[in-house]
Amino acid sequence: MKMKNLLFPLLLLGLVPPLAAKGVYEAPAAFLADAFEGAPPTPAVIWLTGAKRKAVTQILQHKPDRLRIRYWARAGRSAWILEEIGKEKPITVGVVIDDGRISRIRVLVFRESRGDEVRHAFFTRQFERAGLAPGNRLDRPIDGISGATLSVRALTKLARVALYLDHQRTAP
Amino acid sequence: MNRRRRHRLKLKSFYVWHRWLGLVAALFVILLAVTGLMLNHTDALRLDSRHVHSDWLLDHYGIHAPATVPAHAAGEHWVSQWARRLYLDTRDLGETADGRLIGAGRFGELVLIALERALLLVTPEGEVVERLGAESLPALPLLGLGRSPEGRPMLITPTGRFVSDAQLLAWQTSTGQPAWIARSGELPAPLRERLLRAWRGQGLSLERVILDLHSGRILGAAGVFVMDAAAVLLLLLAFSGSGIWIVRSLRERQRRRH
């Protein structure tokens, strides 16, 4: 029997560890360059203090791990590189927002050993054109992936944070 | 001695063996049941976020101080890196995957910490203001952290020196010499001692110890065989217990017939 024929039964028996899910899928700098046609603008920062800190804490269900968030914006477009822990390690996610709606969301760095299905287009496509609904929720449901619940939750939270902060950035 | 009596004695000795085996196995059953229950409720009991501070257990697991502990003074504060964990004085800044500690310095109200692949901006109280990764830095890896004659943060990289604006948002190439460069130092002995205890304590979660107790691995390779022996013992008990029950119920049935 060839090795590849053996692999599936061995995987079923748990004798072969699954291929590592972790890795850098897109360098954050490349994501930004792609979002702004090769020339990202100078970044700006938004401080997470007062009401903003409270709202972000409510979305993340824990205090944010930093006091200010960096973003890149030009015209109606903004790009955010955010991190949230899936189960144990942070997942780095890039979000591009056009006029208050998500136009692109990508998993840039995945450090967990499981749950990397969230990086695939079949999942991230669900966020396209999503906006913010009352209560800082997404205006559409996001279907989960069995076995990747915590990663799905992390990505959904980050999409909400990006939309909320973008709204704060543009609010008069 | 008639046949029936011999049979009774044999059964009695079998029962005595079963009883003694049961007593030994009870210790393992208690251990497995208690640790198993705890592991089934890891999240509720927060076993993964609780850490063991017992010196002998930490020694048993071979958790000792790292060979080198890079440290930098930042004003009146000390930044040190214990394996992958960063500390500002005794404040735990968490683990970092951004490489070796390159330098640290006080910039205005804040402390700037340079690692090989990131820059951390923290308050003197140890709250992270921001982490600047590759997308926000002019070049990597960072080789040194300095201060320009104007008091601005200066990064030394393989492709040159870069000076930032006051907000650390934009970097410009600099040809000037830094007015100051971060140099590593020796942690004060009392601080080193406190950090050693804190760092060792972070190295061993309660979940790891409970898991190892459950599998027997806490005693090393021999412990696994001890737990294997316990499993065989439980199997023997199950068979001997069932055997005793079957023989007794058969005898009971025979007695009723007569």
Image (tube, rainbow, N blue to C red):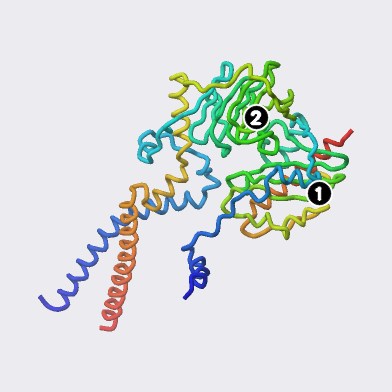
Residue A165 locus on image (x, y percent): 79, 38
Task: Give the camera-side residue of A124 and B243.
Answer: A124
Give me the residue at 49% from left, 21% from top: B185
Check if mark 1 and mark 2 are on a common chain.
Answer: no
Residue B138 locus on image (x, y percent): 69, 33
Q: Is residue A47 above or below residue A121?
A: above
Q: Is residue B72 left or right of residue B119?
A: left
Does residue B109 show up?
no
**Mark 2 surroundings within 10 Å by alpha-carbon count, few (fewer than 14), some (14 through 19), many (20 or more):** few
Does residue A116 show up?
yes
Task: Give the camera-side residue of B25 and A119.
Answer: A119
Find disc 1 in the rendering and name its residue.
A102
Find disc 2 in the rendering and name its residue.
B160
Give me the residue at 30% from left, 79% from top: B253
Q: Is residue A94 above or below residue B149?
A: below
Which residue, as the protein is rendered here, is positioned at the far front? B175
Amino acid identity at mark 1: Ile
Give me the residue at 59% from left, 45% from top: A89
